[in-house]
């Protein structure tokens, strides 16, 4: 199945069998879906607050999602490090199923995405997802998150190799650059005028596309910002390309991590090596 809105595309396995009369095939498909569907684990504090919530969902003004290591590191460096935030939940795979405390303390969190709240902006939720979400799980991952979190608007950060970006005028592109897409419900006055749109025929796939697709279908204001990075490896330059967003309407009012903590995160990445660059 493919879903198209504008110039992004999402492909995921159909949750229904081709032959609607074949109940056995439907059952197999649904069982497989249950097996690979992720699980939301809330902190004791959030779990307690949900007892008084009839809808059993966590509401927030903004949900910020960082997919892959570049986007996740940007969120970690500027908002989540130090004592600026607290972990309130986790999106875990079924085969990794544990209670919240065990997941937080575990050293094996490769397939876990953590949900955070800023201590001084507790109406904003961040989701840091550094590990790859397989395409056959992307739709289910997105659905699970939005079944449990109800944001008024959504901001998505992701990255892709710059060498895969198609443009009629490549001479105008920097080595690392940001492009965007948004849903029809997005308030265009929020846009950074110096960030251009992803041009046709470029497409967005995977979990970032799944989230944007969900927001388009359910009329949720959402914007996706993609960093097209020159390096194959995680580098401070790629991470800091997202810094153009720090002065945007969506991020400028949020409490940032202490500068010394941000510097520690970025310095830990090192400078990178010349041979890692895609253009060498």
Image (cartoon, rainbow, N blue to C red):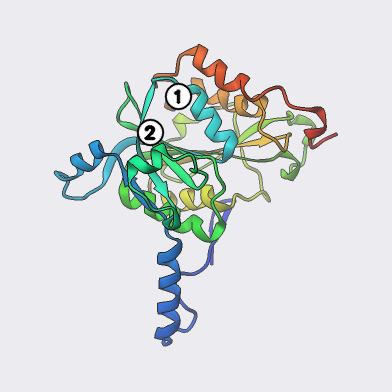
**Residue that badge 2 annotates:** 116
Q: Is residue 218 visible?
A: no
Q: Which residue is mark 1?
A: 79
Identify the residue at horizontal 48%, vertical 48% (top origin): 212
Q: Is label 1 in contact with label 2 (beta carbons under 8 Å)? A: yes
Q: Nearer the viewer, residue 84 or 162?
A: 84
User: In the displayed structure, would residue 37 be above or below residue 157?
Assistant: below
Residue 220's spot in the image, x, y percent?
38, 46
**Badge 1 element:** helix
Q: Decide: is 243 above or below 45.
A: above
Q: Residues within 10 Å of mark 2 (few under 14, many from 20)?
A: many
Q: Nearer the viewer, residue 226 or 69?
A: 69
Mark 2 residue element: strand
Lower position in the chain sequence, tag 1 or tag 2:
1
Q: Is residue 199 above or below residue 172?
A: below
Q: Residue at x 46, y 62 (%)?
A: 36
Q: Quadrant of the N terminus?
A: bottom right
Expressed as whole percent of the image width and height from the top left, the position of residue 44 reads: 25, 39
Please state the horizontal and vertical placement of residue 264, each as a whole percent of the image. 56, 17
| Residue 86 can be seen, yes or no | yes
């Amino acid at each position: 199945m493919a879903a198209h809105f504008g110039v992004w595309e999402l492909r995921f396995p159909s949750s229904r069998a081709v032959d609607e009369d074949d109940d056995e095939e439907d059952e197999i498909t649904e069982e497989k879906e249950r097996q690979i569907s992720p699980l939301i684990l809330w902190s004791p504090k959030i779990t307690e607050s949900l007892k008084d919530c009839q809808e059993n969902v966590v509401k927030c003004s903004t949900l910020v999602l960082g997919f892959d290591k570049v986007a996740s590191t940007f969120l970690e460096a500027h908002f989540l490090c130090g004592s600026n935030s607290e972990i309130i939940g986790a999106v875990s795979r079924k085969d990794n199923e544990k209670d919240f405390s065990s997941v937080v303390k575990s050293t094996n969190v490769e397939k876990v995405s953590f949900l955070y709240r800023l201590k001084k902006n507790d109406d904003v939720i961040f989701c840091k997802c550094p590990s790859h979400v397989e395409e056959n799980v992307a739709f289910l991952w997105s659905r699970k998150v939005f079944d449990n979190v109800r944001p008024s608007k959504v901001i998505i950060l992701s990255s892709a190799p710059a060498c895969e970006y198609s443009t009629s005028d490549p001479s105008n592109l920097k080595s690392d650059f940001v492009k965007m897409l948004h849903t029809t419900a997005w308030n265009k006055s929020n846009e950074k005028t110096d960030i251009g749109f992803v041009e046709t025929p470029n497409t967005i796939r995977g979990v970032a596309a799944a989230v944007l697709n969900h927001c388009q279908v359910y009329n949720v204001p959402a914007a996706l910002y993609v960093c097209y990075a020159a390096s194959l490896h995680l580098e401070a330059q790629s991470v800091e390309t997202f810094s153009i967003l720090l002065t945007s309407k969506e991020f400028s009012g949020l409490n940032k991590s202490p500068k010394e903590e941000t510097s520690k995160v970025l310095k830990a990445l090192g400078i990178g090596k010349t041979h890692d660059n895609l253009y060498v």
